[in-house]
Amino acid sequence: MADVEEPPPQDQGPGVGEEDVEDGKILDEAPVDDSTDDDDLKKVDPAADGEEPSVRKSFPMREMTVSVPFSKQDLHFNWLVSIIGVAILWALAIFCMTSPNASEELGKWYTTTVLYFSWFYVLGNPVMTFFIFWVAYRYGHIKMGPKDAEPEFSDASYFAMLFSAGVGVGLFFYGVSEPLIHQGDNYITAPDYRSQNEVAQWALNITLYHWGFAGWSPYLVVALSAGLASYRFGLPLTIRSALYPILGEYCWGWMGDFVDGWSIVMTVAGVCTSLGLGVMQLATGMTRVGWIDENADVETVYVAIIWVITAFATLSVVSGLKVGIQILSVIGFSLGCLILFLSFVMEKSYFLLNLLVQTTGTYLQWCLFQVPFWTDAFGSLKQGEGGATDDKSPPTAWMGWWTVFYMAWWVAWACFVGMFIARISKNRSLRNIIGGVFLAPTAYSLVWFCFMGGIGLRQQRQALELEKLGTDVFGDAAHYASSFPNCYDVPQEDVVVDGVTMFTNTLLGITPVCNEASSNSWFNVMYSFSYPGTGADGFMSGLSIFALAIYFITSSDSGSLVVDTLASNGAEEHHWVQRVFWAFTEGAVATGLLVAGGSDALSSLQAASIVFGLPFNFIIFFMCYTIQQMCKTLEENGDADVMDAAVMLPKKTWQMPVFGGIFNLVEFILSFGRINVDLGIAPPTNQEMGGFFKNLLVPFLSLHSICSSIDMKGKHSKANWLMTGAYTFFHVCWIALFICGTINYGFVAFGWSAFFINALILTSLRIHVRGKLGIRGNVVGDFIAGSFLYPQALLQMEMQLQHEDYDEDGPVEKEA
């Protein structure tokens, strides 16, 4: 994976002296290299505290400066990252709003993704979870900032902010409803041999798996990789910086721009869909409380709520992280805790405590190993594919509806929440961050779902009791029916029939209770705390609406802050106009989707963001590698406060990276023919262009040339010809078999077999060449290069052997 070109020698400027820093922020922008004559390509100063003189402080990323009338401060942003984010986002939004088949078409994309990549989404999450635990054990002492620096936020504020940005809204909507829903058809309940008690417990187990470690694993990987890159190696706080150990200087070019632009799309799409879908839930609750007329125009109500939330989110994000976002997060979290405590006290408290202890045990037993690896492989088989014939199998799409959806959704949100966690975790140790972001939220979720979900489950069972009581005693299942659908008024006195007590209420004041697993479930529970005549039900519902609104505001403003940071090359200080732009973009997209397409349009954008999150899943695995590399580098270099990121790069590497050469043409085009010289990237040469296409069509010519070059005395000429012949045969085979696969799909399997045989041949050759020339790397990088990037891998080896002196034993030092 170390295919990184050694950056050419360049003047990186002097270090940061005391006169250049005020309150920990670099004041003067690094000068632009006049030789580029390009205003769009500039060196940008990331905000960093206490940089040492040897630490690089400028990076050749694209930046555009726009003057703002009546303002002393200019707008600074990466125009390509911003265009990628805005263009893709609005293209998707317009498609969802205008196309009558958008929901169906994007639904097909989502279904296909689930069909082919369920295993990947399911497997990836526990791998990330165990990796995080390993980091806490192995590198937990490393600090995300200078060793003597104190965290920016108190533990209470820190927890409240990360919780508000990460899962706060979801706990309200799914806290009651999801355990109720999981009592329906799934791989636990479908066999129909478990008791009602077992089904209820497993419903909680499945819910807690979705909201426990699984949710926070991708968040933490992004947070640790981006945070270490920024606060320990002085790189900008962006997603691209997390990939610096792999891409090297190339991360400041077009590849980094596309990574950050793609991250903006996923962040805004996630916030918009949550904002839009949440507004519909808020409108339902406000109508039930009586704050909105039942006959009011629905679209008008939705738009009004969206823009009220957007307005407050804008004020919050403009006021800054340490004012608006911090204060609102603390208020929202405090209100959530108040609702949780009141519900616990007013309900059957001892039952909830029993349930908490019991569920903690089942979570530790089942949700760390078995459930995280469960893909319901047999249950996913449809009729005609070997599907179950005993009618005891859940719907084949269940995993896609729930578990795979959650795993994909957490990844789609990882850019936003991970970057936000990195921003607020400055100067904390990795062990402290993992404890605060991994263990504490999981413990809180355990309490939340056991209490709120447990209340919902208990009340549903009581509703079923009353329905049965009405049928058995009064011959009418609706005898105790409430004015609310699927709800029942709980008798406040014992029900005695012919001297026999048929029903005893030990929890007076809790009425009505409902048997409904839907978006109304939360407010059903809030309205059950009626204590007739006290108005407690209206108070609890109103408090919930207020807390929800604050959580929505904190999600929106946190998302706007992260997007603005990405769009401005990691700068921590931005013009307020930029923050307003992104906050209003979120509100405008959500409004357009709701007005034009309603919930279908929002669900379509949600499905698209999950599909587009698939590539980011691979990036997260690369981030695991970069976290290990950064921590290893810090240990090897004495754990200095901040060090130059170049120390992470190998001392010797390929002359042409596999992502260089012909791919530099993209940088040439996006730079309008004037590549920033500080990137160390040149337009592709004739050799790189011609070599790529030659290797694409007749790779075996280069293969034999490489084999002959390293076999200088011809000792293995027969083996070289044999390898070349085998590679030629399988190369022709996989192309022909894939073409035949368009006629009969059975040929495709043989095509892939031939392709991967070739990949293994080239992988072994690349390993041998690396070893001979003393180039650092690993077998994973060799396999990726030898398979899907084989034209580049062959050209890379050819060029290296042409430009380097070596003999049978390895590289030869050139004489001075």
Image: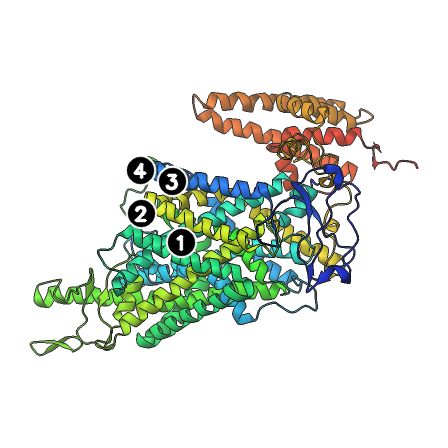
Dot 4 crowding, Cα within 10 Å, few <14, some 14–19, many 20+: few
Q: Quadrant of residue 772?
A: top right
- Vertical arrangement, residue 679 with respect to residue 733, above or below: below
Looking at the rendered structure, the kind of residue marked 1 is Leu
Quadrant containing the C terminus is top right
Tag 4–tag 3 contact (CB < 8 Å): no
x, y (%) of residue 555?
46, 58
Tag 2–tag 1 contact (CB < 8 Å): no
**Going from the N terminus, do you reach mark 1 or mark 4 first?**
1
**Dot 2 corresponds to which residue?**
393
Q: Is residue 91 visible?
A: yes
x, y (%) of residue 502?
14, 74
**Dot 4 corresponds to which residue?**
383
Residue extending farthest left? 498
Residue extending farthest right? 816
Q: Secondary structure at mark 2?
A: loop
- Vertical arrangement, residue 249 with respect to residue 508, above or below: above
- Vertical arrangement, residue 474 with respect to residue 170, above or below: below
Q: Quadrant of residue 97?
A: top left
Q: Secondary structure at mark 4?
A: loop
Identify the residue at image location x=38%, y=67%: 450
**Going from the N terminus, do you reach mark 2 or mark 1 first?**
1
Left or right: 198 in relation to 334: left
Instruction: Give how far apart the Cα atoms at labels 3 and 2 are.
Output: 34 Å
